[in-house]
Image: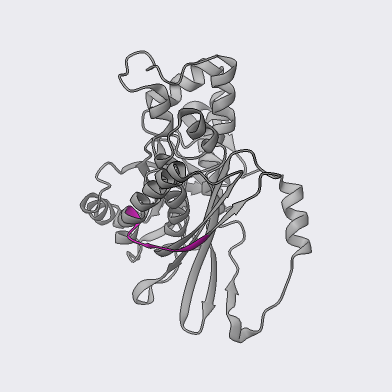
Amino acid sequence: MTEALSALLRASRGTAPADHGVPIPLPGHFAGLIRIGPTTIAATTDTVGTKVLLADRLGRWEEVGEDLVAINVNDLAAVGARAAGVVDTVVCARPDPPRFAAIGRGIGRGLRAARCSLLGGETAVVPDLVHGIDLGATAIGFFPGGRVPVTGRRIRPGDRLVGIPSSGFHANGFTLLRRVLDEGRIHLRRPRPGQRAPLGVELLRPTRTYTEPVDAVADVPGVHGLAHLSGGGVRNLVRLAPQVEFRLDRWPRVPDLFRWLQDRGGISTREMFQTFNMGVGFVLVVAPRAVPAVQARLARTGAADAVEIGTVAPGRGIALPELGLRFDGYS
């Protein structure tokens, strides 16, 4: 994948006139930035991935509609941008009004949570290419009041790591998750031991939207970095600052649902942490003196459950010392 992506990027170089906007280089970051006159715009794009196959199996589509918005606006939040709007893409074998309506209801919930608009979209009916539905979107954001993008360049040893819990698997790692389900012949419509809700409902739980609490702290000078722990798990932190070590020595208790999957699939702890969010969906890198103020703002805007999960140290990569894990980079 890395080699293929590098080949694509090498072959797609282009230059636009200066009056068409000046891109701000942030290689490997969560969103792309472009400056148009005095205004900086952020843009990002992503798909719900193979979670749609689980939605199809269960006949539940609202959750992935909400995911479609959340996964993209969360990437905007990871550079400190405020979401302005979303453009969706639905690629399908055939249009199905009830299914489309359910997806639309989920998109509506996501838009309300992110306080942004649906600007348009594209529906492609291509039965020669797909047999079901593929969902993707692009989100556009801006920096209100002259806000400076949060790029991670001010991260330094001694900074604290504050994590906001996830709502579950979000929309990542479902290829591995579905393999465990299929190999174990696990029934999605039955609850797992000790639970009341069917397993499928737990697995489809929509991605938590972090835009409001992050927007509330993005102007705080002591906020040095923001990371959305999506595909790639804790390795996403390296995208902020490859020249330091993110020492995750206070990781909260991993939710039961993740531990259940690990046990049923015989998945290594290393694979779990490099594939799933493991209970923490967003991380803020904060100067020590600013932590109390940041946590107070988070609590007022829907993230009272945010906790310190580690520190920034000299070195490189990511360490979870209590688990004996180290990741030198994203790949």
Colouring scheme applied when the structure was drawn: one colour
Across and down, in percent, residue 268 comes to 57, 23
Q: Position of residue 285 (x, y in %)?
A: 41, 53
Q: Is residue 23 above or below residue 71?
A: below
**Corner quadrant of residue 241:** bottom right
Give whichever of 78, 139 is nearer the camera: 139
Q: Is residue 298 visible?
A: yes
Decide which of 141, 331 is in the foreground and name it. 141
**Region of the chain picked out in magenta, as a range:** 113-121
- Front position in the image: 272 or 98: 98
Q: Quadrant of residue 10?
A: bottom right
The residue lying at 45 percent from left, 21 percent from top is 188
Is residue 119 rendered magenta in the image?
Answer: yes
Where is the C terminus found, in terms of image quarters?
Answer: top right
Q: Residue at image x 48%, y 64%?
A: 120
Residue 243: percent from left, percent from top: 58, 53
Give the quadrant of residue 305.
top left
Name above or below for residue 244 compared with residue 10. above
